[in-house]
Image: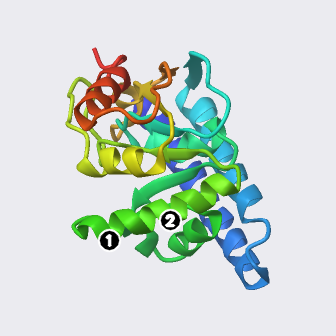
Amino acid sequence: MAAAGRSVAFYLMFYGGSVLFVLLALATLPFGGRGVAGITHAWTGWHRRCARVFLGITIREEGPRPDGPALYAIKHESFFEALDAPNLFLRPAIFAKAELFRIPGWGRVALAYGLIPVERGEGARTLRRMVVLARKRIADGRQLVIFPEGTRVPHGERAPLRSGFAGLYKLLGLQVVPVAVDSGPLYHRTWKRSGTITYRFGEPIPPGLPRAEIEQRVHEAINALNG
């Protein structure tokens, strides 16, 4: 029951606080959304604090990060790494499922922050829209973050990468930094567990590689902690 009690406390504090952060961010939108970035980073910082204090989860990072623009391809085992991305990067531009932007309130804030919607099933047209938005974010000095599996994958499983990842890699012409993460065993469960979540930044992969090679190298690297 200890895990259940910690998890209930986490849910109450994090999600209760999240309502306040979203309302605060929405209040800035009539004034051009100034302050949305700061509020978003405060919200994700609140998530980390709640995870540390109530769940006993600590974070470890391994491996250096390159200088300059990059497309960070992150393993997706739970909501933890999606919520935590603004703690890892300075105002990242994250590719996120379009369904998330339909959440009342939160969706408007996500667009104001600069997340990039991913509409599935629209093929080349969707890809072109994402590339246009991504190039704007790069011009603003922001790092791009993508979860190339497209959805959460249970720890221990190796899902194939979505086809759109290779298309973005080709059209953007950026180096790719694969990032392994092992959040699943601790966070992707109703009663969450204490422990350490590790991010492992892999060796940067240069642009211009054939699709089969970039997919194989990214797939292998993001699953480095998936044993």
Q: Is residue 20 above or below residue 62?
A: below
Kindly indicate the quadrant of the structure image that contains residue 37: bottom right
Kindly indicate the quadrant of the structure image that contains residue 121: bottom left
- Relative horizontal placement of residue 211, taking residue 76 as reference (left or right): left
Viewer-closest of 154 and 163: 163
- Quarter of the image with the N terminus is top left
Q: How would you rate the neighbour count of disc 2 (Cα within 10 Å): few for under 14, some for 14-19, many for 20 or more?
A: few
> What residue do we see at 40% from left, 24% from top?
182
Q: What element does badge 2 sit on?
A: helix
Viewer-closest of 207 and 56: 207
Q: Is residue 212 above or below residue 224?
A: below
Q: Is residue 187 above or below residue 99?
A: above
Q: Is residue 165 above or below residue 128?
A: above
- Relative horizontal placement of residue 83, taking residue 217 as reference (left or right): right
- Relative horizontal placement of residue 71, taking residue 50 as reference (left or right): left
Spatial separation of the CA atoms under disc 1 and disc 2: 11 Å
Residue 82 visible in image? yes
* Number of numbered discs on residues: 2
> What residue do we see at 28% from left, 33% from top?
215
- Quarter of the image with the C terminus is top left
Q: How would you rate the neighbour count of disc 1 (Cα within 10 Å): few for under 14, some for 14-19, many for 20 or more?
A: few
Residue under label 1, please give it.
125
Q: What element does badge 1 sit on?
A: helix
Viewer-closest of 175 and 21: 175
Residue 168 lies, in percent from the top left, at: 39, 50
Residue under label 2, please give it.
132
Instruction: Tell me which amino acid carries mark 1.
Output: Arg
**Residue 160: image tag:** none
